[in-house]
Image (spheres, grey):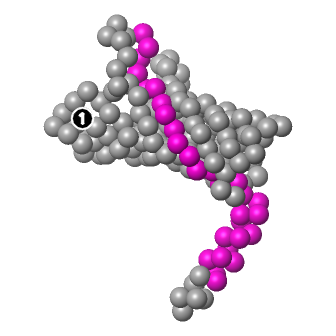
Amino acid sequence: MKKILVFVLLAAILPAAAFADFQLGGIAMYKGDPSAATGISVSDFTFGGEARLKIAIFQAGVSALYIPYTNYTSIGALTDVGLSLDVLFFRFGAGIGPNFVMNFGNGAPNSASIGWNLKFMGDVNLGGLALGVVGYYKFNDFNNVGSVFSKLPWLGVTLMFRLF
């Protein structure tokens, strides 16, 4: 039974791998306010991993982040589904998806929260390596999507390795 399950999974994954592009890597983001008078601190940065799957022009991604704040810490997953276009060795994309955040510590607002994000990204693909820039606009519901561009996004850099 186990051999049959492995065979079925391989039979499903291998054809998808021929037409798909799967990348895995790291992300570092600045989530602070550069106009703040207090300056930049360690809690203004967040780090984590990122995974992307691209089939034709469609792309799905997730960023798993460690998010430090002054009084508490969060672990978050920013997911998105959208479109991605390859032009020469550049890749440009945009997506939308839900955020899942768990807060830890005495000053944490809630134990968990769910929101939404708009993601914009651009990569330079050099063989199996991609170096890129990413921006996340976070919002709570679709009623205030228009006002999301009035504040700065979380800006970051990614270093991705193509697995297949």
Q: Quadrant of residue 35?
A: top left
As shown in the figure, which amino acid type bears the numbered disc 1? Tyr
On whether residue 134 falls in the magenta region, the answer is no
- For the residue pair 141 and 63, the one nearer the viewer reads as 63
The residue singled out by tag 1 in the image is 72
Residue, x 79% and y 38% (percent of image)? Answer: 89
Residue, x 52% and y 27% (percent of image)? Answer: 155
Q: Residue furthest top?
A: 37
Q: Is residue 148 above or below residue 130?
A: above
Q: Is residue 1 above or below residue 86?
A: below
**Stretch in magenta:** 7-35
Instruction: Report helix, strand or loop for mark 1.
Output: loop
Q: Quadrant of the N terminus?
A: bottom right
Pointer 1 local density, CA inside 10 Å: few below 14, some 14–19, many at least 20: some
Q: Quadrant of the C terminus?
A: bottom right
- Is residue 157 left or right of 151 when viewed as pictured? right
Q: Position of residue 142 (x, y in %)?
A: 48, 35
- Is residue 138 left or right of 157 when viewed as pictured? left
Q: Position of residue 88 (x, y in %)?
A: 83, 37
- Is residue 153 left or right of 161 when viewed as pictured? left
On whether residue 10 falls in the magenta region, the answer is yes
- For the residue pair 162 and 14, the one nearer the viewer reads as 162
Residue, x 52% and y 42% (percent of image)? Answer: 26
Numbered disc total = 1
